[in-house]
Amino acid sequence: MHQELITFTENLVRSLVSEPDMVKVQEFLGDEEIIQLEIIVHENDMKMVIGRGGKMASALRIVIQAAAYNMNIKRIRINIDSF
């Protein structure tokens, strides 16, 4: 588990949404040793996390990938979903 990356991602996403207690980040080991992060937010907060034209989601992915790289995690995939 990469708890430091999960905590970083949770704090980052919680700062953007209106219901921060509903944010969950889970880690899975994907194909070919790729770490997969699943970010789950309340469906009302999806517009804040995705942003206009997906720009916020792209920015989140870039920041999380940069943080992962600094933690020596080279291969990561990030999915955003709601419940």
Image (cartoon, rainbow, N blue to C red):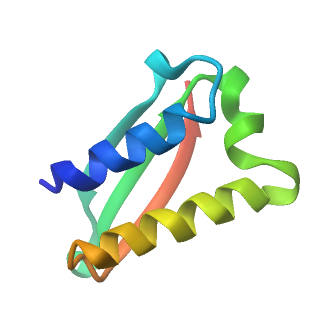
Which residue is rendered at x = 32% and y = 80% of the image? 75
Which residue is rendered at x = 72% and y = 47% of the image? 50
Can you name the residue that lies furthest to the left here? Answer: 1
Q: Is residue 80 left or right of residue 34?
A: right
Q: Is residue 6 above or below residue 11?
A: below
Which residue is rendered at x = 51% and y = 32% of the image? 14
Q: Is residue 18 left or right of residue 36?
A: right
The C terminus - image quarter: top right
Q: Position of residue 32 (x, y in %)?
A: 24, 81
Can you name the residue that lies furthest to the right here? Answer: 52
Q: Position of residue 13 (x, y in %)?
A: 52, 40
Q: Is residue 72 left or right of residue 51?
A: left
Number of numbered labels in the structure image = 0
Q: Is residue 45 above or below residue 33?
A: above
Q: Is residue 38 left or right of residue 16?
A: left
Q: Position of residue 4 (x, y in %)?
A: 21, 52
Which residue is rendered at x = 55% and y = 34% of the image? 15
The N terminus - image quarter: bottom left
Q: Position of residue 12 (x, y in %)?
A: 48, 44
Q: Quadrant of residue 71?
A: bottom left
Q: Quadrant of residue 74?
A: bottom left
